[in-house]
Amino acid sequence: METIRVYIAEEERGLAEAFMEVYEPYVYQGSLEENLREAKKLKNCTATCRFCKKDRTQTTFNQDTHLISKLIGNNGYYSIDECDECNQLFKRYESDLAAYFGTSRTFNHLLNDRKAPSFESANGNIGIKKYSNEIIHLYKKKEATTDFDVNINAGEIKVVIESQLFRPEYVYRALLKMALGILPQPDIANYEMAFKILLDAENYQELNYLKKVCVVETDIILARPFAQLYLKRSENIDPQFPQHLFCLNVGNLMFQLLVPGHQSDLTQIRKSITLQFAPYIQLNIVNVHNGIIRSRTIEDLQSTAQQKRDDSIRMKFKPDNLVAFHPQTGLKDIC
């Protein structure tokens, strides 16, 4: 059995103690694992889709389907019970999740053996390419734009950048899909409502208050994502705490959401939720880190209206310490 080394930063330990009184680790999925060959074999034996419940007379199971979205990191771990129709649907949600990340998918890409995704601002004025972990190229895509302003004399650079459009509700569905994807098989029957929210949320708007996510921003950047599922302790019968909490660590963020719709939770009528904050854990690291939490915010992801994030950049530099090179040939020489 694989041993996982866990470290919790000093500033998180009080929070972790309170959290572990209510929840215990249940499932872990690390994207360093590779299972494509095994997943292909097991998928040939899959009779029913985990998500839409269709069988082989109603749908197909030919595509390789990622358990954690490939758009948020190189991930070689595949699911075995997701049909092709659901895979196509979830790609729409995952595209919005990728747009939600904005420039961070480019800036925080740490895999030298994989090309970082390029970025284009919503209005098409600014482009970003990452050539290595040391070289990032920001450039105008439209020469006449004022979104890229360099003041040599003042030593200032201002770059106006907005993310591509995304729907917050689709971001929520992308996260919920991954949570339900790692849910152990014996628990699936208890989450009939959760799958309905995922596939047909429009008909369950009375449950929109559940679509809240805690976003933890840290000073640690992960090259590959990993996910955790926590289970409410059996001795805890307080109905205010849902049965499962899901955490997804990716880049410098951790997303935490409750898994909605467990049949025991639905017996309690609530108009709001209170998340028991999960600690940010550091797994299998060589050097431990303290003082790494920048912020914790609760984001409401129930809106279906398209939105953009402001990823603008402002930098200062010493005017007497500049190096110039041609933006085409110069980068090739450096890289």
Image (cartoon, helix red, strand yellow):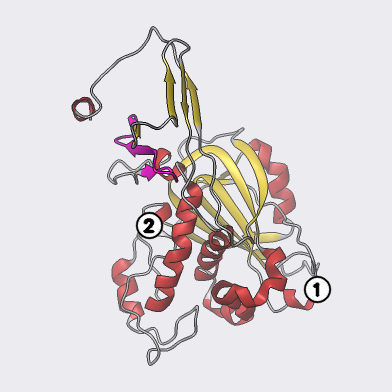
> Is 192 positioned to the left or the right of 320 in the image?
right
**Near-viewer residue (117 or 36):** 117
In this view of the protein, can residue 24 be seen by the observer? yes
**Near-viewer residue (98 or 75):** 98
User: Which residue carries the number 1 mark?
Assistant: 269
User: Which residue carries the number 2 mark?
Assistant: 75
Disc 2, SS: loop
Circle on res. 141: none
Give percent across and percent down for residue 54. Answer: 45, 87
Q: Is residue 169 above or below residue 185?
A: above
> Is 197 positioned to the left or the right of 30 in the image?
right
Q: Is residue 62 above or below residue 141?
A: below
The quarter holding residue 1 reads bottom left
> Is 229 positioned to the left or the right of 65 in the image?
right
Q: Is residue 234 above or below residue 164?
A: below
- The quadrant in which the C terminus is found is top left
> Is 197 positioned to the left or the right of 151 in the image?
right
Please tell me how crowded label 1 is: few (under 14), some (14-19), or many (20+) other residues with Cα within 10 Å.
few
Residue range corresponding to the magenta coloring: 119-136
Q: Amino acid at mark 1?
A: Ile
Q: Identify which residue is drawn at 61% across, 81% down.
A: 192
The quarter holding residue 300 reads bottom right
Q: Amino acid at mark 2?
A: Asn
In terms of sequence position, does the residue under pointer 1 or pointer 2 come before the other?
A: 2
Q: Nearer the viewer, mark 1 or mark 2?
A: 1
**Near-viewer residue (145 or 32):** 145
